[in-house]
Amino acid sequence: MNPVNYLYLAALLFTIGATGVLVRRNAIVVFMCVELMLNACNLAFVTFSRMHGNLDGQIIAFFTMVVAAAEVVVGLAIIVSLFRTRHSASVDDASLMKL
Amino acid sequence: MENLIAPLIAAPLLGAAVLLVGGRRLDRGGHWIGVLLSFVSFALGLVLFADLLGKGAGHRTLTQHLFSWIPVAGFQADVTFRLDQLSMTFVLLITGVGSLIHLYSVGYMAHDERRRRFFGYLNLFLAAMLLLVLADNYLLLYVGWEGVGLASFLLIGFWQHKPSAATAAKKAFLVNRVGDMGLSIAIMLMFTTFGGFAFGPLLGTHEEPGLVGGASEGKLTAIALMLLLAACGKSAQVPLQSWLGDAMEGPTPVSALIHAATMVTAGVYLIVRSGAIFNAAPDAQLAVTVVGAVTLLFGAIVGCAKDDIKKALAGSTMSQIGYMVLAAGLGPIGYVFAIMHLVTHGFFKAGLFLGAGSVMHGMNDEVDMRRYGGLRKYMPVTFVTFGLGYLAIIGFPGLSGFFSKDKIIEAAFAKGGTEGWILGGAALLGAAITAFYMTRVMLMTFFGEERWRNAPAPSPAEPSVEPAAEAGGEHAVPHPHESPKVMTIPMIVLAVGSVFGGAFFSIGDRFLNWLEPVTGHDHGDSPLSAGVITGATMVCLVVGVALAWAQYGGKPVPALAPRGSLLTRAARRDLLQDDFNHVVLVRGGEHLTRSLVYLDHSLVDGVVNGTAAGFGGLSGRLRRFQNGFARSYAVSMFGGAALLVAATLLMRAV
Amino acid sequence: MSFPLLTATAALPALGAVATAAVPAAQRTAAKWLALLVSLATLALAVTVLVRFDPDGERYQLTENHAWIEDFGVRYELGVDGIAVALIALTALLIPFIILAGWHDADPLETGSRRWRPTQGFFALILAVEAMVVISFEATDVFLFYIFFEAMLIPMYFLIGGFGDRAHAHGEETAATQRSYAAVKFLLYNLAGGLIMLAAVIGLYVAAGNFSLTEIADARANGTLHMATNTERWLFLGFFFAFAVKAPLWPLHTWLPNAMQEATAPVAVLITAVVDKVGTFAMLRFCLQLFPEASKWATPVVLVLALISIIYGALLAVGQRDIKRLVAYASISHFGFIIMGVFAMTSQGQSGATLYMVNHGISTAALMLVAGFLISRRGSRLIADYGGVQKVAPVLAGTFLIGGLATLSLPGLAPFVSEFLVLVGTFTRYPVIGIIATFGIVLAALYTLVLYQRTMTGPVKPEVSAMPDLRVREVLVVAPLIVLLIFLGVYPKPVTNIIDPAVKQTLSDVHEKDPRPEVEAAK
């Protein structure tokens, strides 16, 4: 199978994720969309690794997963505490960080 | 002997310092210090004069070097005095007339609470004027030149509580400053051209021509024209004449000393002193004669229309100085006569002013001649001395004005060519007008009915007429009386001078022989014989007197000025010169400064404040991007990433 | 090692400032006396410098040279030439008068009130400014100069913003707003100039490898240090901009009227007579010595700007309604003369400019301090609020007139000598500019006499009818200044003797000679 197809899929997934981040208000969904984007990248990295015949892409994919895991830990904690204080999971309600 | 020159100046300077710094404790007797030091200066002048007379005609120049004033690289100005025949003449005139006027002022200012200061200023004036005529270089002369301007400013504005006096003082100083600009540019030109400005090396002597000979005519003309500008300012010559009439706001002794006898003649001194420069610049000389001729007619016409006795005399002063400037512009033909007329004028004009002051003193400070009349019975001494001054100024045969003015008219004709005829004609016409306006003053003041007995209240309906000074509220009938001795004695002395001065100078050409070594002399060749010119002058004189008699002697003088012809009305307003100044300079200047103040605030400052406001506004805009919505930040991140990718692709494509 | 006289002259007022600030709050009067004594002691030191200085000796004398920040080649290097000596003497001379004139300017607003007015701070700040100005005149290391040139802004900012003129028509609130506006404007203008200069200072280090004025100037003179034409020009512009702001030169002048208007009269004198002189002094010392070719390149533009300053400042002075603003604009006009003299590149012009700095300091101090006395009596700065003061307070009016006459450069008073020298110096090389500048003397007469006429003459206004004449303290301030004005007008030789050799050397730095007269006396 032509590896380029995997790249098309990665691009599609990334676009879906990006659109979700921009369009959705629910923090959980935004969060999941970010994960989607990250994994789309992972897919692209692995594909590149296969196409170029070396391991660089796969290594970076592992890094990405570590970052994603860390992000899940911190991000979910923030979302939970936000929901506790505001009784809402909407990202637009958390707009205090401005001048 | 030359060591006496500095004390000559120092004496009145000391007087000024003592009187001005001394404070109230000198209020009672301080004025006598001023009088004394003025006479000391006169005495020193006489001693020096005797010394000069004892020397040969060629060796009558004394110099005293005091110290180096401004020593900067190539620029060397010294405090050095030079006493030669020309400055000696002035020294005697200044200290002589000055001392008499000091004496007169003791009576005139007897009741003024600020008398001490008045004498301080008078002494300051004497010192500055002596410095002016004794300086050995142009820069030091400049110090005296502005010094007399300062004294004049202080004395014109002596009654400062009157706004008119304060304004007149300011005006005099400002107009003079315009002239001073000419003098400073002249000095700068001398420095760049000759590397110095001391009289000796620059002007040279008869035997030994100075540096002036080496310069181009263009440069010399420029220098001479700038000197002329300076002379115009100080001597109230057209176009810088406007201050002299207003200067009559000062006390009358001031008008006599500063604005008639001495300071206003400084311009003539400057031109005669710089004769070497003018002789080498014929174009500038022509300009000088034109200025003189125009002013002599201008002043005479203004003098005819004024009802204020002092302003009529001021017009006359302007006109007489016009004669002197005209003579000075004629070159070596006229220098001596310019100075001779200057001296005789110093006598009779000072006498006339003191007489006017005496009249005002007896008439509750009334200056409007339409409210005088028939005063000869009440003030006999004033009448006689004033009358002699009058005869002298109109050039009555045998009196001093006759000799000096006649010589100038002759010299004007001797200039030759069309110029000679025009200048001579103007001088003759001026003589006729002089006779007219002086006769008018004489008749209105001392003859006719006693109009002051039923003086009408000043009418506000005639704004064009000069308001009758400060009379405000005092409508009591005055009781004319003769002035005290301390005032009449100086008047008598000056009258004697006006009668015999001219004859004394002219017989045997005494004055000519005295001054010739300094100024040089040239007879010129007149197209008319001296007899014809004298005859013509006499005709003019008679015509002028007769016209005045017809108008003011034969019929009663109206107590209010008639409307008069267009020329009369213009002349009452000083031939509209003030209106011109007002519209063009004052109004224009006000608009200019106001718009500049506005511009400074809105444009220059506005650019700066605008920059500050601009940065503030920009920050305000940028702040809006920081809206707190996580998704909008996300958009900008995506936008940025997209841009980066696009840019990278683009670069690769290229 | 000899006694570090120059350091002492700068350190004494600095220490005095600290000591004055440390005086307990209750002991106001003690603080004042302490400040006055310190300033007098500084004057004594400055006189010692003046005496020890040999006009015909080496160019920089009484030098001190120590390593400071070795990594950057910054040294603590002091030395004075004739120009600096004259200006140090002027500074040290004026400060006691400023302190004496401002004796009550920082007193508590109401007697008995516990509201703290920092009297100690006022006098300490004045001494601090003195210290920094003096060391700026002494520094021959560009970086050292830069530091104090900038640091001066801090005490000046507090003096302007913290101790305003109490004569304010619109109440304390507006006064405070306008005061802080003026202080911030002062600070921003000068900081902007200073930052650009900092860039140029760093650029100079890159180009020359050290900061020493003497070394760089020598290297430039004997050709070992070559600078590209463009580099030199940019560096010159950087330095010049800062000095032109400080001087101030049109169109960078607008901070001065605001600052002088809002500050108390003594502080206004401090600004215009002392601090601003650092700007014009630095043009002579740094611009001309470090960048001779660029200075000549910029001369036409600078001369035109100076000419505009002269005429523009005078015209604006005529149009002012506020006495202190009027004096400020007059000063702008005079600074135009000074800068013109510096850049005329003739010995008369530069001697005249240096002399002008000294004379302008004295004459402005005389005029402004008397104006301050006048304003404090009536509580208003508006010219229209006065009239007929001459009748009520003749001594005040007389001294005011003399100050005014000095401002209009009356011959016989000191400023005339310098103004004429500047005019002649400019005229010999640029006749047209010289002639136009001469119009300045007419305008100067106009604004001075208008001011005098409106305030001092005419009928006595009821508000001024009870005005007391000058008090003893005030006479003590004004009389010596007037005596100096007259003395230096009649006999300026002591000052010109000191200045002249230094000016000759500066002129040879820029490779210029005076034009020769057209007609020369036969030898």
Image (cartoon, coloured by chain):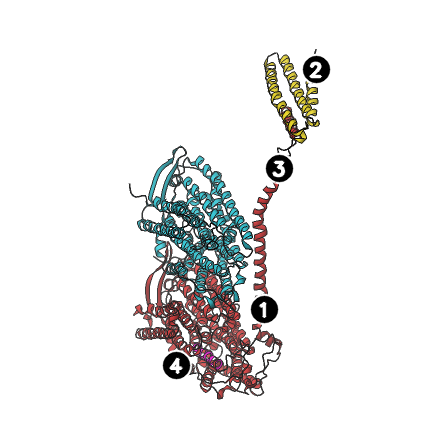
| Residue A15 makes an appearance in the image | yes
Q: In which chain is the residue bearing label 3?
A: B
Same-chain check, marks 2 and 3? no
Q: Are marks 1 and 2 in contact (CB under 8 Å)?
A: no
Q: Residue B198: horizontal and vertical position, in percent?
A: 38, 62
| Residue C343, magenta (yes or no) | no
Whether residue C39 is situated above or below residue B227 in the rendered picture: above
Q: Which mark is residue B185?
A: none
Q: Nearer the viewer, mark 4 or mark 3?
A: 3
**Disc 4 residue type (three-letter):** Phe
Q: Residue A64: horizontal and vertical position, in percent?
A: 61, 18
**Disc 2 residue type (three-letter):** Asn
> Which chain does yellow denote in the image?
A
Q: Are marks 1 and 4 in contact (CB under 8 Å)?
A: no
Q: Residues within 10 Å of mark 1 (few under 14, many from 20)?
A: few
Report the front residue among B62 and C141.
C141
Q: Nearer the viewer, mark 2 or mark 3?
A: 3
Whether residue B321 is situated above or below residue B593 in the rendered picture: below
**Disc 1 residue type (three-letter):** Asp
- Mark with earlier residue (3, 1): 1
**Disc 3 residue type (three-letter):** Arg
Question: Can you identify the residue that label 4 sits on?
Answer: B504
State the hue of chain B: red
Determine the CA span between mark 4 and mark 3.
96 Å
Determine the CA span between mark 1 and mark 2.
98 Å
Q: Nearer the viewer, mark 2 or mark 4?
A: 2
